[in-house]
Amino acid sequence: MTILIILPNWLGDAVMATPAIEALCALYPKAKLTLVGSYVSVEALKHHPQCVRSYVDTTKKGGNRFLNTYHFAKELGKHDIAITFRNQLHSSLLLFCSGTAVTAGRKSWHSQLLLTHAVKPSYPSHLVEQYRDIMQALSEQPLTIGKLRLHIPAHHYERPTLGINPGATYGSAKRWYPEKFAQVARAFSGTHEIVIFGGPTEVEMANDIESQLKGIMVSNRAGKTSVEELCAMIGGLSIFITNDSGPMHVAAAYQVPTVAIFGPTRHLETSQWMNEKSSIVRHDMKCAPCMKRECPLGHHECMKSITANEVIEAVEKLF
């Protein structure tokens, strides 16, 4: 049995697809997986023990993307079954051109034309459940989904360690403020080592937080970790403070106690999945969730109104 899986582009979405992938692998324990996705999604999920091939999708880089997709599909070859978690024309086309007989994806005009199973997930529901609904089209047996899972060993810290993730790749609307993250870190610096995480574009933000923690031992890892290292380091934390982001879902995969700060996004759809020690700090606003990258009203009250003390109290309750 060979299975081709087109992963979501974003790190968090890719991690939220893991329960559906694990459920299918439980049905086909000898199946060989081919994973295709963005660089970050492939780097996070390629460690699955049933993954035998992984590819970063570069079809949109240079030349005609339709022609690139056709050639990439021929390189991937025919599989027994194939699924795409992306609701995107070129992903549907990729599965179609691969020659795979049984294919599935989220229902859309292109999936109805190009795939054998165009699935409309139940809604409203968590994104993990929506991915399960798509995968269910490939199995006659009901798929039982469990917790998020990554197959990268967690890092071991010598002391209790608090991690801070002030960034959110999607946009500034999802980001809480550096000075407030610093206040939270300072409150627990007597009992915990402090590690700051962030991508290459979030280094300045992480440096801002570090500068406000003078006199405190801080490890600033922003822009210095690979995807694999990021997952491992988050996996070993004692507590994690984060915006709604990919690293938030990485923490859930390792069952790290987490306080997640939500503003403009749908917390019922993208909150941590099945993390027993997870807490959400958010305020009900008439304008939220707006799902915008930047605050369309210019005030950003959904995040600005959240205080450091609220987050500190949420951490203390998890302890």
Image: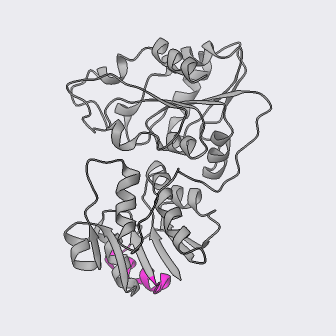
Identified at 39% across, 43% down, the residue is 270
The picture quadrant where one finds residue 293 is: top left
Identified at 35% across, 71% down, the residue is 137
Give the answer, above or below, for where 308 lies relative to 153: above
Across and down, in percent, residue 64 comes to 33, 75
Across and down, in percent, residue 112 comes to 22, 74
Q: For residue 65: magenta? A: yes
Q: Quadrant of the C terminus?
A: top right
Is 72 displayed left or right of 234 in the figure? left
- How many marks do you count on the picture? 0
Identified at 71% across, 14% down, the residue is 190
Instruction: Decide which of 111, 180 is in the foreground and name it.
Output: 111
User: Which portion, as a residue range, is magenta?
Assistant: 63-80
Across and down, in percent, residue 253 comes to 57, 47
Across and down, in percent, residue 122 comes to 27, 55
Colour scheme: one colour
Is 254 displayed left or right of 108 in the figure? right
Give the answer, above or below, for where 135 lies relative to 286: below
Q: For residue 213: magenta? A: no
Give the answer, above or below, for where 48 lies relative to 236: below
Instruction: Decide which of 67, 121 is in the foreground and name it.
Output: 121
Can see residue 77? yes
Instruction: Decide which of 102, 175 is in the foreground and name it.
Output: 102
Identified at 29% across, 75% down, the residue is 117
Q: Main secondary structure of the magenta part?
A: helix
Is 238 displayed left or right of 32 in the figure? right
